[in-house]
Amino acid sequence: LEKAGYAVTREYYINDAGAQVETLARSVHLRYLEALGEDIGEIPEGLYPGEYLKPVGKALAEQYGSRFKDAPESEWLDLFKRYAVERMMEMIRDDLAALGITHEVFFSERELHESGAVAQAIAELERRGLVYRGVLEPPKGKKPEDWEPREQLLFRATAFGDDVDRPLIKSDGSYTYFAADIAYHWDKIRRGFRQLIDVWGADHGGYVKRMAAAIRALGGEEVRFDVLLCQMVRLFRGGQPVKMSKRAGTFVTLREVVDEVGRDVVRFMMLTRKNDAQLDFDFEKVKEQTRDNPVFYVQYAHARSHSARRKAGELFPDLKKMTPSDLAEAPLELLARADERRLILQLVTWPRVVEAAAQAHEPHRIAFYLYDLAAAFHALWNLGNDDPAARFVLPDDEPLTRARLALVTAVGIVIASGLQVLGVTPLAEMR
C-alpha cells in the first residue's frame, strides 16, 4: 500500500479484556504454584498448557514469593492478568521484530473499556436510532428448550446487510465482544481513516458481516472495510508433517521457525499464497537451491543481475560505474531478440502489478510476479550456455553488451523493488 502511495498506519489490537485474559491469568497462576514447588499435575481442561507460561510463573514467584499461594482468586487475578499480558506482549513484540514487522500503534481493549469508549460508541448508535431493546429469535440449530427469550440491547445490524440484529450487552451487564469491536473501529473512523483492513484468523469468518454492518452504520459508504481471513500454516520437515497439539501445549513457535530458516525466507514464503489459502511450509524445501524453492529462485535472479554487471565492468571499465541515466542512453534498439522484448514487456507491467496488489489487498501478487520475472530472466540467461551470442556480456561487442546490461540492470532493480515491498533484503551474492 505504501509503495502505491497510500499513507498507512499499522495497528495491533491487544485482546487484554474478557474471559480469555482471565483464563490466561489462571494458567499463569498454576505455573506460579509450580515454580513454588507445588505439584500441579496435568493442566486442567480449559486452561493454557503451553511451556511458554513457565517463565512467567517463575518470575512472579521470584517477585512475590508465596504471597499468593493460598490467597483467594480475588486477591491475585487482576495483578496476574496485567502481568501476564505485559509478558505476552513482550514476547509478541520480540517475535514481530525478529520477522521485521512493525506497528505504529498498539491498541489495548482493556483501555477501550476503562476510557468509556464502548459506552460512547453505543451512545452514538443510539443517537442515530440504530439501537433498540428487543428479543432475538432462537438461534438456528438449537432446540427451543435450550434457549430462553430475554430482552436485550440490540444493534440494528440487519439494516446494513447482516443476517440478524446483534446484542451489545450480556446478561451480566458487561459489554459483548462485538460492542468493544464497534468502539475500536469507531475510534479509527474518528481518527480520520477511510480504509480499514483487518487481518483475522479464518475461524472468525462468521464475524465479518456484523462488523461490516457496524462500520457501514457509523462510517457510511465513504469508509471501505476489508477483512483478510488467514488460513493456517502447516509445517513439514522433509515432507513429513510436524506434529503439534494445542491440547498438550506442544507446538512450534514463529520465533523457532525464523531462527532456523531466517527472516527473509519466512516472509517470502508466507506471501506465496493468498491469505485465505492454506500454506504448507517445509523446513527442508525452503533450504533447497532449486526452482522449487521460490525464495532461492528469486534471490538467485537478483544475484545473477549483479554478477553480470560485475563481469561487464571487468571487460569494459567504463561500464563499472554506470548511472541510471547512462543506462537510459544505452542503444536499446539492439535488443532485437523476441525473448528480450518479452522480458521488457514483463518489466513494464511492474507498476500496474503494485497498484493492483494494493487495491485488492493481495501482496501474494507481488511474490507471483517476482517468481515469473525470475523464471523469464533465468531462461534468457541459460540460453547463453548453448548460444554464446545470446550471452549478456559479449567481449567483442560493447554496444550490445551495454544494451543488454541495461536490461539486466532493470531486472535487478525491479526484483529488488519487489523484494523490498515484501520486506525481504535483496542479495547481491548467493552464499
Image: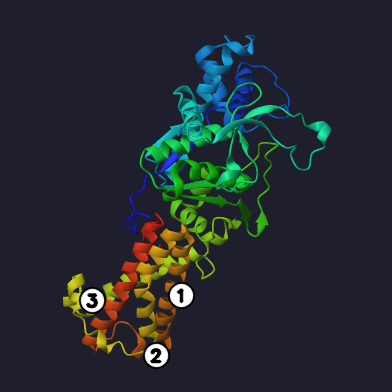
Percent coordinates x, y for residue 17 in the rendering: 54, 27
- Residue 387 is tagged as 2
Q: Residue at 46% across / 52% down in the picture?
A: 262
- Residue 375 is tagged as 1
Tell whether 166 sits left or right of 139.
left
> Spatial distance from mark 1 to mark 2, Cα to Cα?
18 Å
Q: Nearer the viewer, mark 3 or mark 1?
A: 1
Quadrant housing the N terminus? bottom left
Under tag 1, what secondary structure?
helix
* Nearer the observer, 143 or 22: 143
- Residue 314 is tagged as 3
In this view, 392 is above or below 353: below
Is residue 191 something that shows in the picture?
yes
* Nearer the observer, 159 or 46: 159
Q: Residue at 69% across / 42% down in the picture?
A: 245
> Spatial distance from mark 2 to mark 3, Cα to Cα?
22 Å
Percent coordinates x, y for residue 255 in the rendering: 51, 43
Under tag 2, what secondary structure?
loop
Instruction: Choose the circle earlier in sequence order: 2 or 3.
Output: 3
Instruction: Choose the circle earlier in sequence order: 1 or 2.
Output: 1
Percent coordinates x, y for residue 112 in the rendering: 47, 28
Q: Residues within 10 Å of mark 1 (few under 14, many from 20)?
A: some
Three-letter residue code for mark 1: Ala
Under tag 3, what secondary structure?
helix
* Nearer the observer, 39 or 28: 28
Tag 2 near tag 3, CB within 8 Å: no
Three-letter residue code for mark 2: Asp
